[in-house]
Image: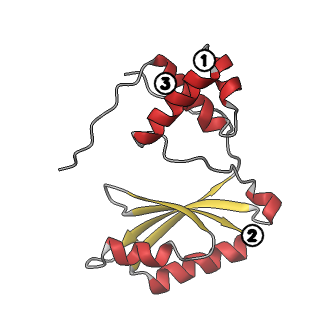
Amino acid sequence: MGTEKNLEIDEIDRRIICILSSQGRVSFRDLGVQVHLSANAAAERVRRLQSANIIRGFHADIDYPKLGLSLQAYIDVRLRPGTSAQSFEAVAMKLSGVISAAILTGALDFRLRVACNGQSDLVQLIETLRSRAGVQETNTTVILRELAGSVRLPDR
């Protein structure tokens, strides 16, 4: 059992989280203006959310096509019986092109998000997965266009 204690967050904290999810480099002054707090009060709230690991970091939003990675896709993976999730994860996360991975419940075991330099690179990545990682089956869905927008937190 974890010893984590849930931090009580209010509507201002929720707005801060949403703003930072799309504007990670916003100044505390500008953040404070948007949530009607002083810069110091906004900074303190961000530090509190970071201390509670609600905000785990700030990341760059990468335009993969501008890096020559014009094809993005999801690869759903079902492992062969007896293949450990840890061994698959160790192989998959080292493959060039894998951006992120999620462990799933249900009929599938993993969902990988990949960025490739075209169809032939995607095919090569899938073949590598199938040959090295204990994969029984894959199903690939190409991303046509990503929808931009800010993060919305579900209502409580």
Residue at disc 2, secondary structure: loop
> Where, by quadrant of the figure, is residue 37 drawn?
top right
Marks 2 and 1, Cα distance to the nearest angstrom?
Answer: 43 Å
Q: Residues within 10 Å of mark 3 (few under 14, many from 20)?
A: some
Determine whether, in the image, residue 63 is placed left or right of residue 78: right
Marks 1 and 3, Cα distance to the nearest angstrom?
Answer: 9 Å
Residue type, label 2: Gly
Query: Disc 2 designates what residue?
Result: 118
Query: Where residue 61 sits: x, y (%)?
Result: 69, 49
Residue at disc 3, secondary structure: helix
Marks 3 and 2, Cα distance to the nearest angstrom?
Answer: 41 Å
Viewer-side residue, 2 vs 134: 2
Query: Disc 1 designates what residue?
Result: 35
Determine whether, in the image, residue 88 is placed left or right of residue 97: left
Residue at position x 71%, y 54% in the image: 62
In this view, the residue farthest toward the left is 1
Give the number of the disc on residue 140.
Answer: none
Does label 2 or label 1 sit earlier along the sequence? 1
In this view, the residue farthest toward the front is 40
Does label 3 or label 2 sit earlier along the sequence? 3
Query: Where residue 129 sits: x, y (%)?
Result: 50, 79
Residue type, label 3: Asp
Viewer-side residue, 109 vs 36: 36
Asked if labels 1 and 2 touch by Cβ distance under 8 angstroms, the answer is no
In this view, the residue farthest toward the bottom is 131
Viewer-side residue, 139 vs 61: 61
Vertical side of 97 occupied by 16: above or below = above
Give the number of the disc on residue 13.
Answer: 3
